[in-house]
Image (cartoon, rainbow, N blue to C red):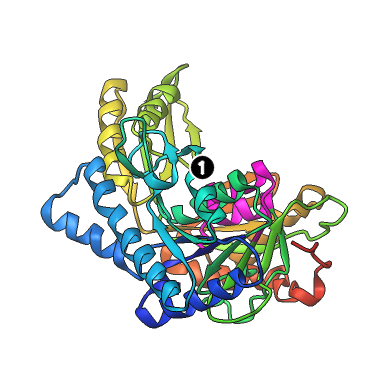
Amino acid sequence: MVQKYGGSSVADPDRIRRVAQRVVATHRTGKPVVVVVSAMGDTTDHLIELAHQISARPPKREMDMLLSTGEQVSIALLAMAIQELGEEAISLTGAQVGIRTDSTHMKARIQEVRTERILRELEQGRIVIVAGFQGIDELNDITTLGRGGSDTTAVALAAALQAERCEIYTDVDGVYTADPRVVPEAARLEWVAYGEMLELASLGAVVLQPRAVEYAAQYGVVLRVRSSFSDGPGTEVREVSPMENARVVVGVTYDRNVAKVVVVDVPDRPGVAHQLFDALAREEINVDMIVQTTKAQQVTDVLFTVTRDDLPRALEITDEVARKLGATAVHHDASVAKVSIVGAGMMSHPGVAARMFGALGEAGINIHVISTSEIKVSCLIDEVHVEEAVRRVHRAFHLDQLGSAAAPKASQA
């Protein structure tokens, strides 16, 4: 069994003790247990703030060195709490566990998990507590896996150890059809398919890191998202057959961490888009929505979105490329947000996008950009309207009726 506990689950000593009790209860059923833990509460945010008090642009390698300390505090404390309950436990960093990554600091990808140390400790009857979010590269430098990276650590360990299942414990009791803080009538889903969960996570649902869902789908790891503060069944994330999944839309999500960039009057000739987006890719800047508008004067406007975190560097690169290309100007807008619907069933149901657009239109919400795939539709809108947009779209698709009672029975994990 692999269990992962998020920052809110270990935010203070009392919560750490409760986690220890849950872990020990699982261990005493006879199952070997590996636990992945995030940094306590807002520790990571505090460390980032501290770094920016020292440097306007902290070196990424040193940020990894700094941020990795948060998880080391929580794993040591949890190991102590478990030992107080009479069980043997050992805390291990990502490097000690053998989580090898590439050298992309702050966004590293796991390349290999060496399980020898974990298996040796489990054979001696110990509960193994692993620092999430971190690994080590070929130079033996500490790397981190990006926001939510502890989820990815847990899934990678579950895959490498061929665990029975991977439980993700957080401050919510499952995956909902929308953020319950924004839509009080949002329903908890009993199960969700890998592809749908990947889209939901990528489009703003913070319950799981997208890369963790990718790993789970790739290696067939069944995930269960549960609350650290209750004993509810949570939501199972697994492979679902097309026949089983008849739901058109399973959720509506939103993302405020979005900024729009527009390059005006770019020469309309082959290779121009490649020059711009290749330059951004070399700096590990992910581009989401892309729209090109051709004009009559042999020029075009190129619009794309990036995260607000990446905006300053993206603007530097875009300005440089725009000058070389002879573009007129580069504009940006960080007061936008993205609202999306996700559902495997929309592939075979026409009119889904139209219903979403209609709900936004009736609310007087203007759409800046539209992006679609087989199982999602995303709209870029003004941030001030984002919560109203989520409520309107949720209501338009009657997602409050997708609760556990309405869903087909999930397989046993």
Q: Is residue 382 left or right of residue 40?
A: right
Magenta region includes residue 368: no
Quadrant in the rendering for residue 137: top left
Query: Residue, x 75% and y 51% (percent of image)?
Result: 239
Q: Can residue 39 be seen by looking at this rendering?
A: no
Dot 1 falls on a residue whose secondary structure is helix
Q: Is residue 150 left or right of residue 106?
A: right
Provide the residue designation for mark 1: 116
Crowd band around label 1 with a 10 angstrom C-alpha radius: few (<14), some (14–19), many (20+): few
Task: Find the magenta span and give its range.
Answer: 194-223
Which x, y percent locates residue 397?
A: 72, 68
For this rendering, which residue is in front, 105 or 350?
A: 105
Which x, y percent locates residue 351?
A: 76, 54
Q: Is 42 above or below relative to 312?
A: below
Secondary structure mostly taken by the magenta-highlighted segment of the chain: helix
For this rendering, which residue is in front, 87 or 350?
A: 87
Please, what is the three-letter code of the amino acid marked with disc 1?
A: Glu
For this rendering, which residue is in front, 261 or 33?
A: 33
Q: Looking at this rendering, what residue extends furthest in the left direction? A: 54
Q: Quadrant of the C terminus?
A: bottom right
Q: Can residue 200 be seen by looking at this rendering?
A: yes
Which x, y percent locates residue 274?
A: 44, 23
Quadrant in the rendering for residue 273: top left
